[in-house]
Image (cartoon, rainbow, N blue to C red):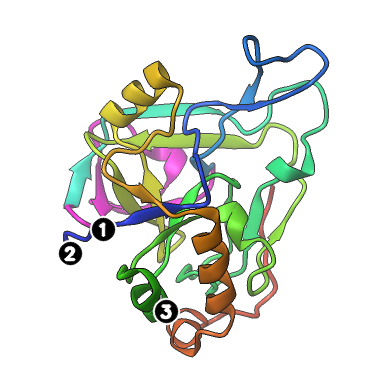
Amino acid sequence: MFGLKTKTTGGTTRHNRQQTEGPTANQQNPRTTGLASGMVTGTRVATAMGWRPVEAIAEGDLVLTFDRGLQPVRTVIRGSHWDAASACPQTLWPLCVPAGTLGNRQALLLLPEQPVMIESDMADMLFGEPFPLIAAAELDGFRGIQRVHPGPGLGVVQLQFDQDEVVFAADGAMLLCAGQCAVEMAALAHGPAHDGYETLSGVEVEMLVDCLHSDVAFSSSWSQGAGAPAQCAA
């Protein structure tokens, strides 16, 4: 829609499986523990049929995207956030985003590695990009965003398109969904599942998040409804 060249921040994002080191894990044989990014079940997504729970979306359904309007979903991957017998480490806990914090009119539960698009004049000034992408984990503590303990069997759905797309969720938040080709290439190269999205350095991420705390324009644009008690069910 806008044809913007966006940036992904917060380091490498693994869109297929998240892994953690443990007594039986090593670089050659990591322990698979669940889906690292995607949308938790119950998250509403803008589609050609209106706002629908992500778990109700099937291959071929048209979903509204930020850059290219309605696009068909090519692949739907369903799984769980954490499927190991051990307790989920706090670094992988999902984050509860209060309504109004990121343009979302509903409280939103995000996986820590899920890239989120925000609109910020400050980001435009710093990097020449008014719509940067930030990994949700980088927003921990930002305007009421906090980690919550995941309940058992937290379901996750990944939507894949022909190419990377940003979709609308929770009545206004913007989330990145990986393109099918990018995911396939990432699986072969063991790298990030992005196609055409740049990554800011860790220093740039810190700079942007720090500036967002004092970005009055950002606060005015996104804070409507913020401050209400978060009601994230993990």
Mark 1 or 2: the one toward you: 2
Q: Give the range drawn in magenta.
A: 41-68
Judged from the image, the secondary structure of the residue bearing numbered disc 2 is loop
Number of residues whose C-alpha sits closer than 10 Å to that of mark 3, classed few (under 14), some (14–19) or many (20 or more): many
Image quarter in which the N terminus is found? bottom left
Q: In this view, does 123 lie to the left or right of 156?
A: left
**Is residue 22 positioned above or below 50 on the image?**
above
Q: Residue at the location (38% across, 62% down)?
A: 132
Residue 125: within the magenta?
Answer: no
Residue beneath the point at 33% across and 22% down: 184
Between the C-alphas of marks 1 and 3, the distance is: 20 Å
Q: In this orientation, which residue lies closer to the viewer: 111 or 208? A: 208
Tell me, yes or no, whether the two marked residues, 1 and 2, touch with CB atoms within 8 Å: yes
x and y percentages locating residue 58 in the rendered image: 33, 32
Q: What residue type is labelled 2?
A: Phe
Q: Name the residue under label 3.
A: 122
Is tag 3's residue or tag 2's residue first in the polypeptide sequence? 2
How far across and how far down the image is residue 64, in percent?
Answer: 25, 53
Do residues under tags 3 and 2 come within 8 Å of each other at their CB atoms? no
Q: Name the residue under label 2.
A: 2
Q: Identify which amino acid the numbered label 3 is placed on.
A: Met
Quadrant of res 36: top right
Using a 10 Å C-alpha cutoff, classify the residue at mark 1 as few (fewer than 14 neighbours), some (14 to 19) or many (20 or more).
some
Q: Name the residue under label 1.
A: 66
Label whose residue precedes the other's in the sequence (1 or 2): 2
For residue 76, above or below residue 135: above
**In this orientation, which residue lies closer to the viewer: 40 or 57?**
40
